[in-house]
Image (cartoon, helix red, strand yellow):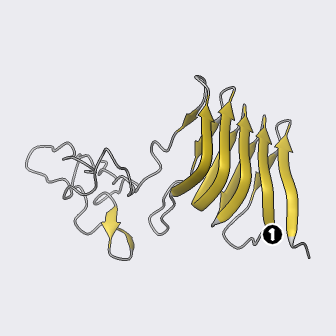
Amino acid sequence: AFDSIGAVTVSNSGDLIFNTNTVLPAMEDLVVNNSTFSLIGDHSFNNISVDNGTLSLSGEVSAESVTLSNNATLTHAPTTSTLEHGLDLNVTGTVTIDETSSIDVSGKGYPAGSSRGYTKGESGPTTSGGAESRCGGSYGGLGGEYSSYDTNSVYGDFTKANDLGSGGRYH
C-alpha cells in the first residue's frame, strides 16, 4: 500500500475516474493535460494544474495553488436525486485562470423533477416544497413561475454561492 504519491498526471486524452469507494493516498500535485479527471471526496494537494482538460472535484479540496489554462474547466459531479455533490475549494496561495478557461458548475445543482423539482432538504435532496409544473428553481432569488403553480422558497445568496441551486419542474 502507498502512503503518498508525489504527483498524479493524466494526459493525452486519458480518462481517470474514481468513485466514492476509492481511497487514495495523499498526493502532492494533481496535473491534468488534455484529459478528464474526476475525483469524489475530500483531498489536499500542493498544486492543481489543468491544461486543456476537465477536472471534476466533489468534496472539500485544499491546495496551495490552482492553475487553469488553454480551455481548462474545473467543475464538480452533478447532484442526483439522492446524492449531493459540490465543490468546496480552499486555496492558500494563488488561483490563475486564463481567458479561455473557467470554473463552471452550471447545471450541477439539484435536478429537475417530473412531479416537482428537487431542492435543499434537511438531509439531502428532496422534492418536498420543490418547484411545481413548468416553474424554475429558486436560489438567491425567486425562480420563474407559471400560471397558478408555485416555485420553491428562496434560499441562499447569489453573491455567495454556498449551496447548490434548485431544480425546476419539467412538463
69 left or right of 156 in image: right
> Residue at 77% across / 50% down in the picture?
30
- Camera-side residue of 90 and 41: 90
Q: Nearer the viewer, residue 66 or 149?
A: 66
Horizontal placement of 129 versus 55: left or right? left
Question: In the image, is residue 132 above or below residue 9?
Answer: below
Q: Is residue 10 above or below residue 97?
A: below
Q: Is residue 9 visible?
A: yes
In the orientation shown, which residue stands out farthest toward the left?
148
- The amino acid on which the numbered mark 1 sits, given as a three-letter code, is Pro
Using residue 126 as the reference point, say whether residue 14 is left or right of it. right
Residue depicted at 92% across the width and 76% down the height: 1
Residue at disc 1, secondary structure: loop
Is residue 40 positioned above or below 96 on the image? below
Q: Position of residue 69 (x, y in %)?
A: 68, 30
Report x, y in % for residue 135: 22, 47
Which residue lies at the image location 28% right of the left edge and 59% below the top edge?
116
**Residue 89 in picture, x, y percent from top left:** 55, 54
Question: Residue 74 versus residue 96: which sits nearer the camera?
Answer: 96
**Residue on which the image places disc 1:** 25
Q: Is residue 34 left or right of residue 41?
A: right
Circle count: 1
In this view, the residue in front, 77 or 149, is 77
